[in-house]
Amino acid sequence: MPSKLHHLSKLPLHPLPPQHYSPLLKPFLTAKGAHAPPPVRVPPDYIIMGFDYKTSFFLVFLLVSLHFVASSGLTDSEILLKFKDSLSNASALSDWSDKTTPCTKNNETNWVGVICVDGILWGLQLENMGLAGKIDLETLQAFPDLKTLSIMNNNFDGVIPLDAFDGMLKLKKVYLAQNKFAGAIPSSLTALPKLLELRLEDNRFTGQLPDLTQNLQSFSVSNNALEGPIPAGLSKMDSSSFSGNKGLCGPPLKECNTTNSNSDSKKPPVLRIVIIAAVVGLLLGAIVAAFLFLLRRRQRQPSASIEAPPPPIPSNLKKKTGFKEENQSPSSSPDHSVGSKKGEAPKLSFVRDDRERFDLPDLLKASAEILGKRLLRVLLQSST
């Protein structure tokens, strides 16, 4: 089936009468001579997308006009004056005026602190001018060819947004040193592919260093409040570039101490300590209960000799020694007479050949001490 455009190509073309020209396009379409435009030919009474040719010409002109208005944007003077308005104590920039342009065609500049090359704004060097306030770096993003930004030794303060350098892909030198900037270092600095020099010393930056992987020729973040490990991309810098930041660690500074970070993992869990303490308490309670049980049991039994009586003396020994069994007194054999005295509680004793005698309380006490020492050793090992 033939398309609509196929039929359109076969339709006869007729010149558009001047009375149908749009008032906006009429001066151009009615020009004569060398500037005369070619005749405009459209199919007679043909409707394009539901509009006649008059409406179509108006829409095309409107779209072209909007394109030129949108692409024009602000001038360099307007952008810099907007940046100036965001500053405090900007008396040093008194020659920044809308009556002149910052750059001339002869590589000269009409405004102080502005660097121009071939009539294009190349950089800003606003050093030692006493400028203050919160710097509006978002306004400077309108300069795509900006290569140098230096605002050293002023009184700028506040936190720089993390995306403050987005789109400034041609920046090579950034000098923000000797101000009062606080907060984290903008992470958008890591996205500047041509960055060669970065000076951020003598500020109040906090947090960790961003992972700068560019081949930096000059770098310093000394005298801030940064902390954490130094990224690998900056480990080959001189140690003086990081001085004055007590929280920084890693090459080229001292190694990071991982003991503190792992101390929580080395501590025994609370549940484990509670279980060990409960077991120790039960064991000690069992020992005390056993001791009391034995003590009461001995108190209920009558007094009796614990050791077996000595064997009878053979008759032949009686004759040789002259001893008589019935005449033996308790004092004649002190080692064999171990009967308890009247009114004295029975006492269980243990005797070894190489040691002196010890009683049941001594045995229980020694067992408790040994058990307590072992449990204490287990607790100490689990806590270290």
Image: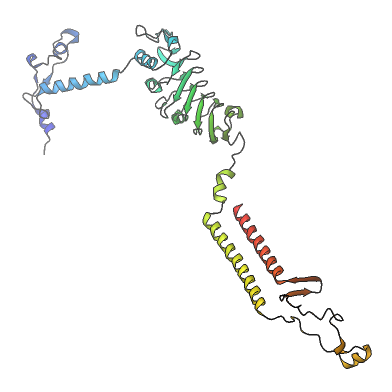
Q: Is residue 376 left or right of residue 205?
A: right
Percent position of residue 265, x then y: 54, 50
Q: Against 70, is 326 above or below?
A: below
Tell me which residue sits at (13%, 13%) in the image: 26
Foreground residue among 233 and 206: 206
**Image quadrant occupied by the N terminus:** top left
Which image quadrant is residue 258 in? top right
- Label count reads 0
Tell me which residue sits at (51%, 26%) in the image: 204
Task: Report whether residue 212 is seen.
Answer: no
Foreground residue among 89 and 98: 89
Which image quadrant is residue 277 in? bottom right
Q: Is residue 181 left or right of residue 64?
A: right
Foreground residue among 132 and 344: 344
Q: Is residue 360 left or right of residue 174?
A: right
Scheme of image coloration: rainbow
Task: Report whether residue 188 is seen.
Answer: yes
Tell me which residue sits at (43%, 16%) in the image: 122
Q: Against 349, is 234 above or below?
A: above
Which residue is outermost to the left?
A: 45
Percent position of residue 311, x then y: 81, 87
Which residue is outermost to the bottom?
A: 315
Percent position of residue 25, x then y: 15, 15
Percent position of residue 346, x then y: 71, 76
Foreground residue among 220 and 248: 248
Which residue is outermost to the front?
A: 343
Which image quadrant is residue 322 in? bottom right
Tell me which residue sits at (55%, 57%) in the image: 273
Q: Against 172, is 107 above or below?
A: above
Q: Against 382, is 11 above or below?
A: above
Q: Is residue 372 left or right of residue 60?
A: right
